[in-house]
Amino acid sequence: MSFSSRVSRVIGVLVGLTFLIPVAAIQPPVAAAKGSCTGWQSTLVPPDAIRVFRKATGVVEVVPFKDYVVTVAAKEWPGWLPTAVIEAGTVAVKQYGWFYAMEGRHRGKYVTESGECYDVRDTTADQLYKPAKARITSKHYAAVDKTWDYSLRKSHKQFLTGYRTGQKGTCASDATGWKLFARTAVKCANIEGYDWLQILHAYYSPDLQFIRSDGAIVDVEGAPTGNALVIGSTLAADGTMTKFDERHDAIEWQGNWQRTRSKAAFKRTLTYTSDRDAKVVIQVAGRSLEIIGRKGPNRGRLRVYVNGNLKETVDTWAASRKNQQVIFSTTWSEDTVRTIRLELDGPPDRPRIDIDGITTTR
């Protein structure tokens, strides 16, 4: 088969992708709805699994996320496409599913009649998860393995990666910054010689960052450009030790938290609550962690979870007020990203918790 005939065949198949790409992925991201289903908390490490509604059976399946990604990629980015296009498409597939598996991004209508929630549908409403029909090739497995540790950000925030067939044209001639177009991406690979990072950069720029799962920002060549203080929603020390104020954007406050000024506090502010349902979620990259807070007569207990597992319950009571106290500390042998969750633990007569900052080392 000649090159032109092969391209025509590829484009013919790609036309079918027009009906495969989620409508929701066509638009720029909007504010996420409240609520969670899978409720994944890391924007650096992909979820372990995703909840998929199977239209044919009406059943919600919990699918290992890597299996889900390779199956959808094989169905929506056929194996005869250029390798670089399959790799770029695999990243887009992964981040689309990941986006909706995150905590706070569950769509309210994505619930079965029996009340069971799910993250995505296996139809054109989301992504085509068709294990019995997907033709998974060695190129798809290799693409997943090669790109698994990478994700995308716009202005350091995770976004919904749209992708469509697109129109005929030159490499990235239809780029909008929000969608990956398959037809012109083939030109990027076959004519311009772009690799997957260059293709993604061409379609999702401007303000695009490539982030590795270890917290490093990399350039379009894949070379690290250093550690940022905010990587997505992650605290990462810039050097040996860094202390972050509790007002840092990477600290997510859930529930009724209030902020007050205090000359005795780190950078003169504290964030506090007496709401038993209040939580704090932080992603930390490093080898150690200290949580800084205020102790006092009416201060209560705090449960500290690391990657979903209860690490310790700490008591912030003291006979007199003590500022900038280390209320929790731990160390690890491995420098990697971890999700830290803080929850109030009473007791009723001293429910208040004050958070002043976070210290981490790399």
Image (cartoon, helix red, strand yellow):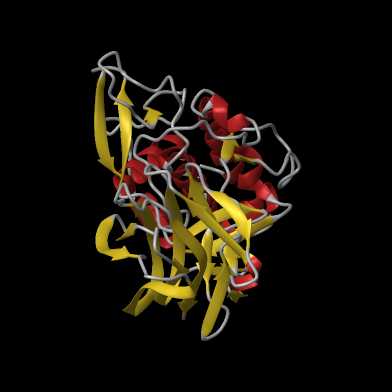
Relative horizontal placement of residue 230, taking residue 111 as reference (left or right): right
Residue at 33% x, 41% y is: 68
Point out residue 268 in the picture as x, y percentages from the top left corner. 65, 68
Q: Residue at x 28, y 34 (%)?
A: 131
Q: Could you tell me residue 37's position as x and y percent?
A: 35, 34
Q: Outermost residue toward the top?
A: 113
Foreground of the two, 42 or 164: 42
Residue 145 appears in which quarter of the rendering? bottom left
Residue 244 pos. (x, y %): 57, 70
User: Residue 194 sits in which quadrant?
Assistant: bottom right
300 vs 100: above or below = below
Residue nearest the observer in this picture, 83 or 117 = 117
The image shows a total of numbered marks equal to 0
Task: Name the residue rendered at 55%, 78% in the picture.
Answer: 242
Q: Residue at x 49, y 32 (%)?
A: 34
Q: Is residue 218 visible?
A: yes
The reply to whether residue 222 is in sight is: no
Q: Nearer the viewer, residue 114 or 137?
A: 114
- 242 displayed left or right of 352: right
What x and y, as percent, mark residue 303? Answer: 31, 58
Q: Nearer the viewer, residue 340 or 90?
A: 340
